[in-house]
Amino acid sequence: MRPFRRNNSQSRLLVNIISGLLKLNRKQKTFLSAFILIAAFIGYVLFEQQGLGYRMPPPNSQQKSFLQEGIWQVSHVVDGDTIDVIDNRGQKYRIRLIGANTPETAKQNRPAEPYANKAMDFTKKIIAISKNQVRIKFDGDQIDKYGRNLAIVYVNTPKGEICLNEALIYEGLARARLQYNFSNAAKEKFKFAEQNAKNAKKNIWNMSN
């Protein structure tokens, strides 16, 4: 077998880089070290902001979620129908509320849809009541095509436990999405909640706005 040989131009470039680093004085080395640390920090921040730090399974609706049903700590409310939870090791998971679709918040050059921010504020306030703890329950598909965890989210309040998915629909801050794979019992609740919101002309169903 012939030994691996590095391209001459690549070898010269590597030698020049190493030689240049060795010739740096103390002040220059200090500056270079600081530059590398700042670059690494910026890279880490971008990594987190883009959601690359989240543990998301491949987009396959038949695959089971990494999450376990039970009580979880909410680390971030992304928008009205999407939240992030975190485990005791610091691992983050993104959850999409199944069956409820809130208006889209602002993204890049696209402004927020009407009632998007109100829906997000509603979700934040409800979750804050339980000190940012929620109960996760699966119903049907556990993963959507974007790799997010699909779940019904319950929040414990002084008046008892409420279903956040249903509450958003009931308040006219989300539309019921019944075409997806989850139980008929949940679909009936969401359908009833949406009809009530329409009858009361709440928020997105207020035709005068």
Image (spheres, grey):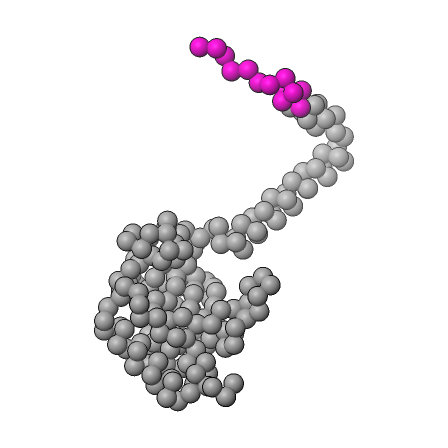
Q: Residue at 47% of width from left, 86% of height from top? A: 207
Q: How many marks?
A: 0
Q: Residue at 23% of width from left, 71% of height from top? A: 184
Expressed as whole percent of the image width and height from the top left, the position of residue 202 reads: 43, 85
Residue 129 position by quadrant: bottom left
Residue 194 position by quadrant: bottom left
- Residue span colored magenta: 1-13
Q: Residue at 37% of width from left, 71% of height from top? A: 100
Q: Quadrant of the N terminus?
A: top left
Name the residue nearer the viewer: 70 or 122: 122
Expressed as whole percent of the image width and height from the top left, the position of residue 139 reads: 27, 64
Expressed as whole percent of the image width and height from the top left, the position of residue 203 reads: 46, 83
Q: Is residue 52 above or below residue 78?
A: above
Residue 6 part of the magenta segment:
yes
In this rendering, does residue 203 appear at all?
Answer: yes
Expressed as whole percent of the image width and height from the top left, the position of residue 181 reads: 27, 63
* Residue 120 falls left or right of residue 191: right
Name the residue nearer the viewer: 201 or 35: 201
Q: Is residue 75 above or below residue 36?
A: below
Residue 171 position by quadrant: bottom left
Q: Residue at 33% of width from left, 81% of height from top? A: 193
Q: Residue furthest top?
A: 1
In this rendering, does residue 22 appear at all?
Answer: no
Residue 84 part of the magenta segment:
no
